[in-house]
Amino acid sequence: MASTCTPLTLPVLPLDDEVVLPGMVVPLDLSDSEVRAAVEAAQAAARSQPGKPRVLLVPRIDGTYANTGVLGTVEQVGRLADGDPGALIRGRGRVRIGAGTTGPGAALWVEGTSVDESVPEPSPSSQLRSNRGDLYPGHVAELVKEYKALATAWLRKRGAWQVVDRVQAIDDVSALADNSGYSPFLTTDQKVELLETADPVARLKLATQQLRDHLAEQDVAEAIAKDVQEGVDKQQREFLLRRQLEAVRKELRELNGEQEGEESDDYRTRVEAADLPEKVREAALKEVDKLERSSDQSPEGSWIRTWLDTVLEMPWNERTEDAYDIQGAQAVLDAEHSGLEDVKERITEYLAVRKRRTDRGLGVVGGRRGGAVLALVGPPGVGKTSLGESVAHAMGRKFVRVALGGVRDEAEIRGHRRTYVGALPGRIVRAIKEAGSMNPVVLLDEIDKVGSDFRGDPAAALLEVLDPAQNHTFRDHYLEVELDLSDVVFLATANVLEAIPEALADRMEIVRLDGYTEDEKVVIARDHLLPRQLERAGLDKDEVAIDEGALRKLAGEYTREAGVRNLERSIARLLRKVAAQHELGERELPFTVRDEDLRDLIGRPHHVPESAQDPAERRTSVPGVATGLAVTGAGGDVLYVEASLADPETGAAGLTLTGQLGDVMKESAQIALSFLRSRGAELELPVGDLKDRGVHIHFPAGAVPKDGPSAGVTMTTALASLLSGRLVRTDVAMTGEVSLTGRVLPIGGVKQKLLAAHRAGVTTVIIPKRNEPDLDDVPAEVLDKLDVHAVTDVRQVLELALAPATADAAPEVPVAA
Ligand SMILES: Nc1ncnc2c1ncn2[C@@H]1O[C@H](COP(=O)(O)OP(=O)(O)OP(=O)(O)O)[C@@H](O)[C@H]1O
């Protein structure tokens, strides 16, 4: 094997951040002083020796020379493409650098030794190890093949076809490896590594590895670039389409003669122009950003638009000035409602306290039992809603009514989350929007009819709305921005106090409206209902009048209710009739309706008092029927209890109860029966009859559910009447719970029951002794007409209620089928 390690002394041509490998031909700039010095030194030396001028090309990295350089010959000196003086240098072979000297000229001269770069000869037998020890010649061929393949692949990618052939033509291992010197992707360090690897096979291996790594990197980079490009393309396409859409819209606007920005969709301008609290504006602008990014048809876009509409419609900074003139308020209440003195007094007190607290900057009364909310409780048609409206008039505020009957879903109060299809804000937010001010009077109507089920508890949401400690930052799920409800006046109405969820009732100040007496109804009808209905019927008050007798008859016989709603309807019907008759030329005006005209105009009365009925027609005309008093959602009412004994031969034994009775009522029937079984003998009743015979107790109006213990005395009386054969007095009605020993225990709703008894034409009422103080609440005109007996024992009840036994009212005990 030839080894030519010739010592050389050459001028150094430093290459900054550049590497020239043997075989490469490079142009170098002679305007660089070091390059020029080296070339000139080489040219000078060449004059005294044969051959081309020779330089030593040495890479210099960060000012430090590499250990190996390349012998280069100056092929040509002339001009570079940019016109600067340049030299074309060809790399010839590796030179190991030795000591430096100063030679002739400005250049640095070094001594070096040329490196042997020959490749071992292929061995005759592939099995034989070569003298290189680690590689077989067969592997070298493989390596050459792999390098060429990789290089070709890379060159093809770059479209450098001419170079492909040149590379394919190189057979020398060393030259092939050094060809990598042209690779633009190699770093200077990588090229220096190639330069310093003298062993050609090891160098080719290194070059192959570098090429392979680069190709792999390139694949990854290409994949990423492709993804990025696709994304960019889509964005660009969308952007272009959007611009086109905008242009089309603009054209359309111009076509329709609209001005720029007039489009209702211009939410940004609207939000910026609207009078919104800062936080709300921020939230709204965020949504506008989202809207602008979303496409026109996307469902999200339409949600955002609906939301923005809602936010823009809210009266964020609107409020009405309060008219806290208490005398004026009282005058408004008096003008709009007759009677109800105590209720109006409570409302006036409420307004006065509110005014004083506001004057002193204390805010509304807070905390539990704070009474911040007035609840008007009473039967339908007694004016709860219209009183709420009057409160708003009296305070000079807007009025809105929120109907809560049948609300079972918490979202009804607090709104649906926006992600729901068809989501809406809750009723409170809608009410504020409707009111158009942030401080209206909000009437929560029928708060006792709020239910709860799997959809959450609306009562809990209402608690938050009504709690002054929390309601200044009320958050509706839909609106998602805080709403200050602290300045809203909340009022509530309910028919039945007990049905109001307890936690809510706890926060309210209850004001009861129990219903009106006949006299009160007449006054209300004359002063309020009649004038309003005259107007509705298009009649003048000088044209038609209804005299007091007729009004009384309407209240007493045509309607039977705690409130005045049906009374108002009857008046409306009456007036329509008169108006029609007048138009048909059948009636002269002016006309005053008297009680005797009613039958002609609106037919016969629906409610004739029991006492006015033919004795044989009366409910109590047979033994076993007693008149009780009860309170229902519609106010007080009379109710008849019927009892019968089954035939000992055919009827089943035991107690049968009908008429949709609740558990408490069923138990009080058992008690009545047990009492008679144990004490009946003392009362001289034939209790033997109760022994083997089935007992049936029925409450007519069977479709209406009933409950409570207050019918105890009535059931006992009905059974005693049945056993004794003595009739119950028609003019007597009763109420009271009975204990097993016969004591009469107190009950609720005395006022409503007495009003009902009076309405029904009853004259004697039996109540428990312990309810006597409640009589203070009953209007005097009603008490005057009633003979009220307060009793402690059921024996007193029987004495008062049962008519004396007469021969003809003989005990023909009715028998149930
Ligand atoms: N004291 C009164 N003075 C004048 N008008 C009255 C009075 N009480 C009731 N009214 C009138 O009777 C009508 C029925 O009253 P309203 O609708 O307020 O009853 P309500 O108690 O709210 O009933 P509901 O429980 O069914 O809502 C109204 O037109 C109201 O103006």
Image (tube, grey):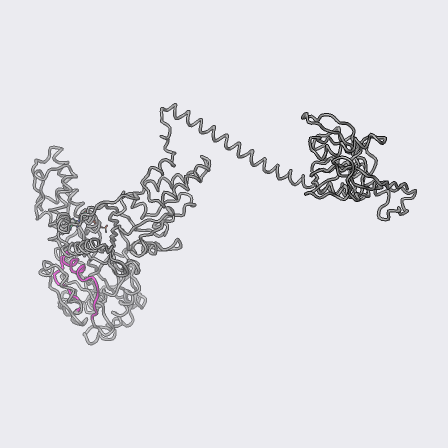
Q: Nearer the viewer, residue 543 or 553?
A: 543
Instruction: Residue at the far bottom: name it.
Output: 682
- Residue 332 is situated, as x and y percent measured from the top left of the image, at 14, 48
Q: Closer to the camera, 226 or 511?
A: 226
Say left or right for 189 vs 503.
right
Q: Name the quadrant of the C terminus.
A: bottom left
Q: Nearer the viewer, residue 776 or 460?
A: 460
Q: What residue is shown at x 19% (from left), y 69% (from top)? A: 724
- The region drawn magenta spans 744-768
Is 757 in the magenta?
yes
Q: Is residue 680 left or right of residue 90?
A: left
Q: Position of residue 9 (x, y in %)?
A: 81, 39
Q: Position of residue 401 (x, y in %)?
A: 26, 47
Give the position of the N terminus as an image quadrant. top right
Camera sees residue 150: no
Q: Is residue 472 at all visible to an observer of this figure?
A: yes
Q: Image quadrant of residue 36? A: top right
Q: Is residue 522 above or below residue 165?
A: below
Indicate left or right for 302 with 605 as reference. Answer: right
Count of numbered circles in the view: 0
- The quarter of the picture where residue 182 lies is top right
Along the horizontal axis of the image, is 45 left or right of 714?
right
Q: Quadrant of residue 717?
A: bottom left
Is 273 magenta? The answer is no
Q: Is residue 687 above or below residue 466?
A: below
Q: Nearer the viewer, residue 117 or 411?
A: 117
Q: Position of residue 221 (x, y in %)?
A: 64, 39
